[in-house]
Image (cartoon, rainbow, N blue to C red):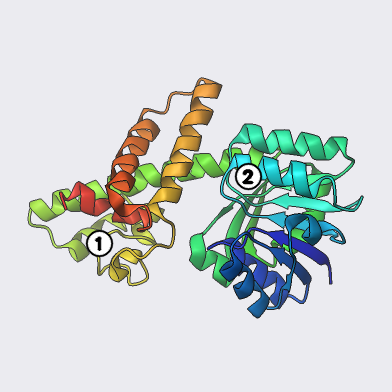
Amino acid sequence: MAKIAFIGLGNMGGPMAANLCKAQHHVTAFDLSDSALAAAVEKGAHKAASAAEAVKDAEIVVTMLPAGKHVREVYEKDVLPNVAKGALLIDCSTIDVDSARHVAGLAQKAGLEMIDAPVSGGVGGATAGTLTFMVGGSDADFAKARPILEKMGRNIVHAGGSGNGQAAKICNNMILGISMIAVSEGFMLGKRLGLDAQKLFDVVSTASGSCWSLINYCPVPGPVPASPANRDYQAGFTAAMMLKDLLLAQQASAGAGAATPLGAEAAQLFSLYVNAGNSAKDFSGIIKMLDGK
């Protein structure tokens, strides 16, 4: 049983911390939201009054925070000055590559081990413990972190050195955002040409147009019962989070000199969708905007 500090108990962090409690680890948790912290305590975590307090006796620190600025602030002000020597730091936030590498550099200077380990799989995957982790860091740090990550996820992929987990995540989600728009456009065209949605799904799901956005997350009600389309697009992965990741991909593209015209267009479309009041809806709900609704 490891002593784990978990900071950031939102829609993803809360279920992830709960799975660590379920695995009999001693989890000390902190979040700025009293209700999120209370929910974590109900699942077996121990309450900390601050992030600094949470990490004091921790062997492992896991963070799940909204953006790079939050990660920098929490590590610089709370984690690094207070965590015990020899602790392993695991940041599961999805942030910009530069921030991930900056914080990892600070940890290395402090003599601490750190990996960036952003996730894919949404709230359902976080709850079920089936997330995919894309990990950046040394081979030794990855090996040390893997038993902990395996309590929260099913697929653990070492993507290379520090920051490479973030790089893999934003590339993946750029592909996801683009493919969801493509699937949505295909179904809207089919609708206007008189095609039944189920018939179109039956064809495309076994043909060359098949992809994850279609098979697992079909944006029209019916063909995939578990998809948010059957729950009025109640979010598994919000449109706001997709927009965040697409903008991170565009930031990275500009810095790396990479041409991503479809990624840029996807970011523009999701910006329109979010700014129309749909930030909390599932990202697959963009089909309604493309349908003129």
Give the numbered dot on residue 70.
2
Q: Nearer the viewer, residue 141 or 87?
A: 87
Q: Nearer the viewer, residue 80 or 147?
A: 80
Tell me whether circle 1 and circle 2 mark residues in contact (CB < 8 Å): no
Q: Few, some or many C-alpha atoms within 10 Å of disc 1 (few <14, some 14-19, many ≥20)?
A: many
Specify the quadrant that holds the N terminus.
Answer: bottom right
What residue is disc 1 on? 220
Give the mark nearer the N terminus: 1 vs 2: 2
Q: Residue at x 59, y 63 (%)?
A: 33
Q: Is residue 287 above or below residue 37?
A: above
The x, y position of residue 91, in whole percent, is 69, 50
The x, y position of residue 121, in whole percent, is 52, 59
Q: Residue at x 66, y 44 (%)?
A: 71
Q: Number of callouts in the render?
A: 2
Q: Few, some or many C-alpha atoms within 10 Å of disc 2 (few <14, some 14-19, many ≥20)?
A: some
Quarter of image, res 128: bottom right
Q: Is residue 208 visible?
A: no
Left or right: 204 with respect to 251? Answer: left
